[in-house]
Image (cartoon, helix red, strand yellow):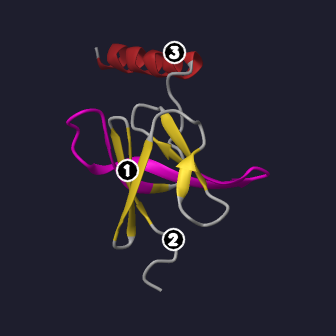
Amino acid sequence: MSMRIFSALGFALVLAACSGEVSPQPEGQAIQCAIGAGAEMGPNCIGERITSGDGEQFIVHHPDGSFRRFEFLADGSGIGLADGAGELVQDRDGDNLLLSIDDARYVLPIAGSGE
């Protein structure tokens, strides 16, 4: 009986891998976020900083696999939306940047704070 369970489990894992449902965890730092109306803040998102020809961006990966892209403004005045969706509201609280877009909220540590 245990061999049947193991075989069924193995087959399910192979099937999931082939169908693209299993993806690797994004690399980066855990950040505080609350995704959805009424959601509680917790270290549920992954923040990834990338540099490209378009400048520096910060990607926040949500637990459900979706993500939000931000861009660091060239004049150093803050952060903006790279994907242009929604209205970004930002504030500073000590060493953190508080962001909200629609029903999502994020707390990003400010680079170089505390030095």
Picture disc at residue 15: 3
- How many labels, in total? 3
Question: Mark 3 packing: few (<14 Cα in 10 Å), some, or many (20+)?
Answer: few
Q: Earlier in the sequence, mark 2 or mark 1?
A: 1
Q: Amino acid at mark 2?
A: Ala
Q: Which residues are magenta?
A: 30-58
Q: Where on the picture, by quarter, is residue 2? A: top left
Residue 53, given in percent of the width and then of the height, sits at: 79, 51
Q: Which one is in front, 98 or 15? A: 98
As helix, strand or loop, the secondary structure at mark 2 comes to loop
Q: Is residue 72 left or right of residue 37?
A: right
Q: Measuring 39% from the left and 20% from the top, which residue is drawn there?
A: 9
Q: Which one is in front, 108 or 27? A: 108
Tell me the quarter of the image containing the N terminus: top left
Picture disc at residue 111: 2
Q: Nearer the viewer, mark 1 or mark 3?
A: 1
As helix, strand or loop, the secondary structure at mark 3 comes to helix
Query: Is mark 3 in CB contact (under 8 Å) with mark 2?
Result: no
Q: Is residue 82 left or right of residue 94?
A: right
Residue 48, given in percent of the width and then of the height, sits at: 55, 52
Q: Measuring 45% from the left and 39% from the top, which residue is drawn there?
A: 87
Q: Amino acid at mark 1?
A: Tyr
